[in-house]
Each structure stands twice: as structure tokens, then as C-alpha cells.
Image (tube, coloured by chain):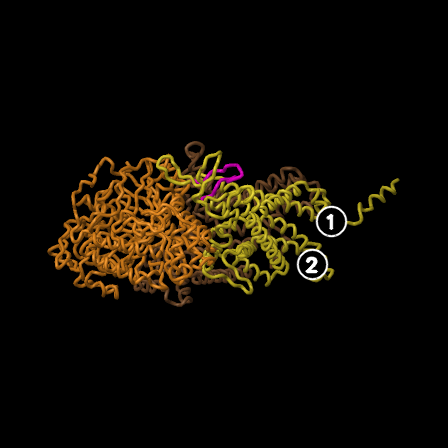
Chain colours: A brown, B yellow, C orange
Amino acid sequence: MWRFAGKRALAALLVLFAISVLVFLIFFATPGIDPAARIAGRNASQETLTQVRASFGFDRPIWVQYGLMMQHLFINRDLTSFVNRGSQVIPQVMQAIPVTLSLVFGAALIWVVLALIMGVAATAARGTVIDPLILVIGVIGVSLPVFWLGEVVNLVTQSRLHDTVFAWVPQLGYVPLTDGVGPWALHLLFPWLTLAVLYAGIYARVLRSEMVASMNEDYVRMARAKGIGETRVLIRHSLRTSMISIVSLFGLDFGALIGGAALLTEVVFGLQGVGKLTYDSLQNFDLPVILACVLYASFFVVLANFIVDLLYAWLDPRVRHV
Amino acid sequence: MTTLDTERAEVPSSPTAGPWRTAWRDLRRNKVAMGSLVVLIIIVLACIAAPLYESSIAHTDAFTSNVAGTITINGQTVPVLEPSTEGLGLGVNPIAPTWTAQYFLGSDNQGRDVASRILYGGRNTLIIGFASAILCCVLAGIIGIVSGFFGRGVDAVLSRGLDVLWAFPVYLLAICLSVVLISSSLTIGPVTLSSASILLPIVIIGIVYVPYVARPIRGQVMSLREREFVQAAVGAGAPDMRLLRREILPNVLPTIIVFLPLMAAINMLTEAALSFLSIGVQPPDSSWGTIVNDGVGLLYTRPWVAIAPGILLAITAVTLNLLGDGVRDALDPKARLRGAA
Amino acid sequence: MRLHRIATVGVSLLAVGALAACSSGSSPSPSGSSGAAASSASAVPSGSASVGNDSDVRPYDPAHAGGTLTLLAKGAAGTLDPKVNYTLQFWQLYQGTYDGLTAFKHVDGEGSFTVVPDLAESIPDTTNGGKTYVFKLRQGIKFSDGADLTTDDVVSSFQRIFKVSSPTAGSFYNGIVGADACIKAPETCTLEGGVVGDKTAGTVTINLTAPDPEFLYKLSVPHAAINPKSAPTKDAGNTPIPTTGAYMFKSYDPNTALVMVRNPNFKEWSRAAQPAGYPDEIDYKFGLTVEAEVTAVENNQANWLYDPPPADRLAEIGSKYASQVHVNQLTAFWYLPLNVNLAPFDNLKARQAVNWAIDRNAIVKLYGGANLAQPVCTILPPGFPGYEANCQYTNPAGDTWQGADLEKAKQLVTESGTAGQEVTVIVADDEVNKAVGEYVQSVLNQIGYKAKVKAISGNIQFTYIQNSNNKVQISVTQWYQDYPAASDFLNVLLGCASFTPGSDSSINMSGFCDKKIQAQMDDALKTEQTSFDEANKKWAAVDKAMMEQSPMVPVMTPKLIDFISKDTGNYQFSKQFYMLVDQLWVK
């Protein structure tokens, strides 16, 4: 177990290193990215440009810059932004984390519950018209572009019906949990729903498909033969082994979302999370912030996959660990 | 009498139909799947017929900007982009859906006919969506099966590769790539890709989602590997390739088939995001995703510009998934055994 | 319309390398200065600013004092340091916080372009042939941290301009004696002989190397604000520097908000130069999308938004909320620079074809309609000194632009032999710029080219199109100006000195350098020292000559929309720094 964890930890470091190098290379391979002119100010003189370049270390070779940036990020922990001079990157990311976590946990809870209900119901109702109907609803959710959906939600709740039906909807933005669970949840309600709609359909589809396939398996037939009721068969026998695919997907999605993949949702609803921070830094070509956000996100992806791999063995005892 | 019955019961209904023909026969019987196939074919044909629509029915240009143009409705000549006259007279609104042959769904902010653009755009969306989904599922299938089956070192390397891929900042790559491709083209071997080439989004989207499909497959294969029938085949001395081909693949295929239309739906949307960053479909070409992007900017005044392609995206995704379900059910012999749908 | 960051331009009549302001696209970019729109008046005061009467200064009404003003913007504007920040977004805030020796009057309308004494008691007459100014510093002024304002602070502030490498150090302030040494070696800058303080007499003497009629304007912009001598010698970034004005900066988080509160040590000394403000606190919040900002102002959840309203909300706010909307003319223009050193626009006929083909009314429509912009046909905007109505590319012919001529354009393209060539239009990726880019692409296709349009992030588009290594053939960009001097448009945008090949800082994007026209410009510059009217006539001739060469396609002049919530009052618009933020009533 510990050897396994140790090997995975090493592999994780390798993954993070690879990503950081890739980000760096992509950034510097792009023409027009040179931040010196933008930092120096419009129409700055050539001398000013040179001075700015030197003060940021842009005139050093690329591996030296990489080393320095990594040093500032991990060892000194005082890495500063290119765009907001003097603004430290790590506090920015730390400030954004609770917002993203709040958004993702709530949405994940909602979509998993929804998907379980939809998936089990579709399996139970297979052969009737309800099965494809549930599928249709789910797939429509997946086909909706996130940004559009968010804007429509805002259009309805903040603008058109704000004075009547949706007068209880608060202003856009994030309210920390410390200010009260009620306000916190109320501000996040529509972001949660918007994000959940996108994922519920996928999970319901996959779950239903796995469960229907497992309905024909020997162990299920065995359970039926023993006289166990259909509901129990569904939930206790079929559901558990069908969860493997779901758990894989969830690990990928959850890991990515914590890392900031919900950026469009955060942008539309004015939530200053890691996703929005990443989005802004990409628009600004702010390399230190981009690097910090990408590494943060990668860490969670690796962690999530690690946990999922551990879960396989629990879900399906027949799976042996490598 | 009894003997005759028994005999009859044992004789197969026709000269033995192979598995593919049986599957096709089952599919044809599945009304929902057939209905979906018909709808899909209609959509594809409509998109193919886009130039016909443009020239014979709509008589409007789907690609040239028509900002200063006018059209005649009910004998009145109205500008396609109408300046607002209320209050301070700020803003200019594209014409609303006319529900007639010309500007059926109204105009976009460049004065172009949205309905024509949707038909032309459908080609790009469908091609990119399907091609990238197929690429993704094929690659993911191979990687997932190999990784799950062989385990150990192979799995470790492939899985970490998938981790890097999934954690990779695709947006950054897309933004930087679009800047690089402004002046130069990308040459990989014999292939030269300019930023407008649709191969680019197909490859990028196809590769980026590989982990999403590969990991569930890998998990399934790991579970399958321990099953009795596989163990039995191993015990009988079957070589790996045969195991993969005859035991593993057929059991994993249904999962892949479920993912295929799902990924097609997701990919059609991801294509919109890439086009927004100037990779793939470039103006004045359109795709359903780019029309939705344009439409979001018109949401408060002309919501139909974003709703119409959205509806088409949803219909295509739903029919693909229904069809996929039908195919999967038809191919799964155990489903027939149980008599379940 | 300016989107986020704008660079301002300062003009030094003597230094040909004047700075220019340009505004870039929507995304926040770190540099940029404010553009001031100035329509202008006649001669720039030389030496003494007209103080004039202060009848346009509104008296203080204590009944409306108090409350919190909430402002919204998509993003922050970079550093808070007034000597480095070059964006309109923050220059608007510096008016109520920082003071220079002189200031632009905080009033609505024409008077906003007048320079009045601020930290100086009065505006002195120049001596020594216009090269020496002796300012008497006002007594009793304290910084927001309690320290007294002394002549030492003034001297160190001028040195600081060079020490922090202010963007305008080399263009506005290089006329000060000792500036050359400071530009070469900023860390050891002393400005010896240039800025001399006399503590006992309470005076500061500034010596220039040559007379500069623009100098008082340069003293009035935030780059010349007086900071305490304890201010850091490098860019202060997010850390606020103590202020002398009515407000101080309490906190600044570029991802969330900027908070200003009343300066506890402030006592109003001149209502024209630094009026007491009304709100007790100003919260400038960042992070909402522009659509959400408009909705927030409509719902009375915020007082004002900085960003221009999106196209699909204009009709709504112009009709339902018309009483809360203020539209003001800007002295700025949108144009398409054509690279004269690259095919196909190295060919004169090809360039003229584009000028003939572009339907300016179409672009006006894409911007928001005829009530928000006007087509232009000259480089100098209408009403600007040096502007003379004439249009060489209109059909039917006339003094102002009436219509495009596609047929003529197609003919010119064929004659030029460049037909069928590939052209890429580079634009910023915000809504309006993208729409204009698509339109331009469509027109180029119609006249015979194979055109593509590329939208890149507004943050890098502006520097990208300046660098000749990127081989940009045509792009869409904007230019704002803050002093009413024609050289600021003509000499800066198309002068030979503004073109540096291979640099991100090369405002002359066309790469245009015509010796004859440059000689005409140098002549006009010289004439400014004697007679502005004569000089303006020469500038008009320069404009005409340039348009004949067609190195750019001037498209339109925009207007600025200020949308305020229904509970906000006392809106005033200064042509220099736009809406007077701290003079708004929230009660």
C-alpha cells in the first residue's frame, strides 16, 4: 500500500514537472507575448523597455527564468504577477480556492444525486417510454453551451423576472460561508444548478447503460433466482458494479473542476474562483499566475485519479491492484 | 405430435443468420432508433443542401456582411440592421425572425441570414463533432484496453500520460497556437495546417478528451480481466491478442458505443470554444457553436440567434444517443436472451 | 470607445517623440493612459494658464454628503502607482486623490480643459525666456498619513518620475534640466539644476532646456503628482501611496475591489482644483461580466459601470433608462492602419482602394448607431485644431464623407495588380472590434482580396500590431488624445520617429515615413511657437497630404456613454478625465 502510494507520489511530481515545462515552452514560443512592452507602458522608450526587461529577468535564458520562477513559487513563495506588479500570486490563488470549492462541491452533490435518480429510474423503466424520455432530458442538458445557459439564467433571474418571480435572487457574486450558510447557498444556487445540468445527463446515460448491461449478468440472475426483489437487485447488486465507470468519470470531472475547469460558469456568475483567475491570467498573458493555476489544477487531477484507482478495488473486489 | 413440436423448436428460424445480420434486424425493429436515424438523415441532408437553400429559397448571402443592406417585408423596405428610434436612439438591432423565406430566423449582427448560416454551419459542426468523437473513442479504446489489460508498467506509463493530457491547459495551447498561426502555418510531416483547417480542431478535441473515455474503459477492462470466462480462456492457453479480440473487446464495445454519441455532443460544443479562440472555423464560415457565440451577444434583443443552433445541437445529440442505444442493444447478445429492450 | 486601457498622449512641442494615446481593445491591459478628450480651443496658453472665473465650479452642497458609491468594471487597471499607471480607468480616480503643482479644473464642460493652480499657490509667469518657473507651495497641506507637504516632497517626486521609469519620463519630462542624465541612469537621478527646492522660502524652481507651452498640462497629469519623499523608488504596485487630495486609497485587490475613503487630513483649499467629495466611501468592484454590470446598474445595485454597454443593451438603456444615460463626444477616432512596407498595401492604389471601399456608416452601425459615432475622412477629428473639412474618398464627392464607392475600389485593386492576394485583418477580441473586423474582411473579399480576420486578446493586440516583425498588413485600432494639438495625431501616429522596426513600442503602425511630409510637419511644429493659427493651417495641409498617400483608413469618432443608476445624481463630465467620480451624489 505504501509502496504503491510512494510510487504514485513520484509519478505525480513527474506529471507536474512535465506540465510546468510545457506551459513555459508554449508561452515563450508564442510571438507577441513579450510582456515587457505592456508593463513598460504605451509608447515607452526603448531604454525603458530594456530596463523593464532586466528588472523582470526577461533577458536571461529560458531555463534560468524557469528555475527562478519555480524557486519563487515553491521555495520563497513570493512569486509576483507580471500584470499587477507587486501582487503576490499565491495569496491570489488561496483566496480563490474556497469560491471554487463551494461551487464544485454543491454542483457535484446535485448532479450525482440527479444522475443516480435518473439512471436507476431509466434502468427500472427500460422498455417503456420513460427510458428514452429520461435520456432525452439528460442529453439536452449536455448539449447546452455553458456560457449561454448561464447568460440565460441571468437574463431571467436578474433582469427580466427580477422584479417579480425572482426577486429573492441576490446580486451576482460570492458570499463566504462565514457570513452565514443561508446567504452563501442562496448566492450559489443558480451557479450550482447551471453547472449540474451539464454533467447530470452524461452520468445518467453512462450509469443507465452500465446497469442495463449488468442486468444480464450472472450474479444478477443469481440474485433474482434467490428471490430478491427487483428494487434490491437494482440498488444493491447492479448499481455497485456499474459505478466503476461513473467513479472514473467523477474523478476526472471533479479533479478538473476543482482545478478551475468551471471557468465559464465562474465568469458568468461573477464568482472569483480559480477558474476565473485562470481565465483572466490567460487573457492577460500573466505567466506566473497561469503557471500557479495550472500546477494547482494538475495537482488535483493527479490526486483525483489516484483516489479513483484506490476506489476501484473497493467497488469491484475482483479487481486486483497493480 | 410432441416429437414434431420438439423438432420444430430446435430448428432455427432461418438459415443461420450471422451476428451482424441479426443485429441489423434487431435494429430495424427498434422504432425509437429508426426514428432517430431518420431525423439524423434529414438534418444531414438539409445541411448538404445549404447552397440550394441559400440560392433558391432564401436569396440571401450567408457569408458576405450586409450591414448596410435592406429587405422588403410586406411591401415595406426595412434596413437589415435597424437603428433604435426609442428614447435616445442608441443601439442597432438586427432584424427579428421573419418566418418567411428571406431571413427566416432573422439576421445576425453582420446582417447575414441566420437560417442559411445554420445550414452551412451544420456541415462544419457535424464533421468536426463526428470525426473528433471517432478519433477520441478509437484512441481511448486502444489505450484503455491496453492499459487495463496489461497493467503494471504499461499501465503506469499510459495512465500518467493520460494525467498529463487531462491536466494540460488546452485553452493556453489554443490561445498561443492561434497567435502563432496568424502569420505562419503548422507543418507536421507532409501535412500543412493553417489556422482555418478543420483538421486542427478535430485533432485537438479528439486528443484532449481521450482520458475521459479511456479511464472508464480501463477500469472496466481491469474488472473484466478477472472474470471467469477470461480466466478460463487464459487457462486454456489463449494468447493475449486472442483474449483481447474475443473476450475483452466485445464486452467493452458497448461502453465505447455509449460514449461515442456523448462525446460527439460534447465535442460539438468544445469546437465552439476553440473557434472563439480563432482555431478551426473562421469567419465568415460558421458552425453551430460560432452562431451560438454570436447569439450570446444578442441574447437580450434577438434570442433566436442563439436558440436555433442550440436546438439543433440538442436534437442531433439526442438522436445520436438514441441511435447509439439502439445499436448497442442490437449488438449485445445477452440483451436478446433476456428479452429485454 | 475605450475599453479598458488607454494610453494617453502627451505632446511636447519640442521633442518630436511625443507620446500617443491609444486605446486598445477590451481586455484589461496594464498600460495605457487616459485619453482625454479635448476639443479645443484656441491657443494653448503659453506660460500662464487662464484661471478665468470659476463660475462653472459648482458649490458644495452638504445635504448630499455621505454614503457609499459603488463603481463596477470588468477588471482592474494594473498598478496603483500614479507615476506608472497609464490608463483612463485609474486616472479618473487620481483626480480626487493626488495633486500636482497644477491641475485641470474639476468642472463640467469647456472649462475642464483649463489649468488652475493646485499645490502651488498660483501659476507663475515664466522667466528666463520661458524656461524657468518658480512655484510657491501652499502651506498647511498634509498627506493622508499625517506628514506635512514640503518642497522636499516636490523635488523627490520629480526625481521619482525617472526612478520608477514612468512611461512618459522620456517624452513629457525630458525638457527638464538634468533629465538626460536621469533617463540614462534612473537610480541615481537628482535632476540637478532642473527642479530646485527652497525650503525656507517655500518655493520650487523648475528649469527647462527650452520653452515649452505645453508644460503646465504636463504638470497637471498624474505622472507629475506630488508623492511623499518616503514613496518607494520603484513601482509601488498594489500598495497605495499617501495622497493629498479629498480621498485616499484604503485597499486594492486587483481581483476583487479597490476601496477609497475620505482623506482624514484633507481641508479644501481650492474647489476648482481639488473639490471636497460627496461619498464617504468609493467601492470600485471588479469581476462581473459587462452584461451583469448593466443589469446591476439597472437594478440600482451599483451606481455606474466603467465598461461600454454591450450592443444588445444599448436600445434598452437608451429607451427605458434614458434619463440615466449621458452621451458625450470624444476627441478620438477608430482607424485601420495599413502597412506600407508589406504587400499588398505597399501599393498606393491598393491603399486608396480600401479607403474607397469601407462604408463608414456600416461601422458606425456596428458600434451602436449614428447617435454614438460619426464617420470621418481625415486623421484629425472634426472640431479639432487643424481640422479642415475635406474628403478624398467619398461618393458622391463632398467635404465630408457621404458614401463608399465599391466599384471604384474594385477598379483600383485590379489596376494595382494586387488582386487575389491574401490579407489578414488583426483585431482585438471584444464584441465590437470583432464585428468591425469581420466587416472589413467581407469588404476586402468583395474588392478582390482573399481576406481573413484574426481576433487576439485585447491585451496583446495593441503591442502585436506595432511590431513590424509580426508582419501585420491591416488592423483595427483606436486613438485617443488628451491635448488639443494636431501634432499629437499626425506627428505621433505617422511621423518617422514613431516607427521603430522590430519593437513592440512603435506607434506608427503603418510604418509610414515620407520625407517631404515629415518636413512639412517639422515646419508646422516650429510655427506653433509663434502662431497656433498659422500652424493649424499647416497641419490641415499635412492631413490632406497624408490622406492622399492613404497610410490609414480613418473610420469614425466615437461618443462615450455613462450609464448611472437612478439614485445617482450630480453627473458632471470633464473633457480631460471624463465623469467626475467623487462629485456624484448617492444621497
Q: Is residue C422 above or below residue C4?
A: below
Report whether B87 appears left or right of B95: left
- How crowded pointer 1 is (Cα within 10 Å; few <14, some 14-19, many 20+) is rated as few
- Position of residue C541 measured from the top left corner of the image (x, y, whole percent): 27, 54
**Residue C221 is inside the magenta segment:** no
The residue that mark 1 highlights is B21
- In this image, C319 relative to B208: left or right? left
The tag on residue C550 is none
For the residue pair B27 and C55, the one nearer the viewer reads as C55
Give x and y (percent) for residue B195: 49, 57
| Residue numbers of the magenta segment | B93-109
Asked whether the residues under marks 2 and 1 belong to the same chain, the reply is yes
**Tag 2–tag 1 contact (CB < 8 Å):** no
Gap in angstroms between the C-alphas marked 2 and 1: 24 Å
Extreme-left residue of the structure: C201
Q: Which label was assigned to residue B243?
A: 2
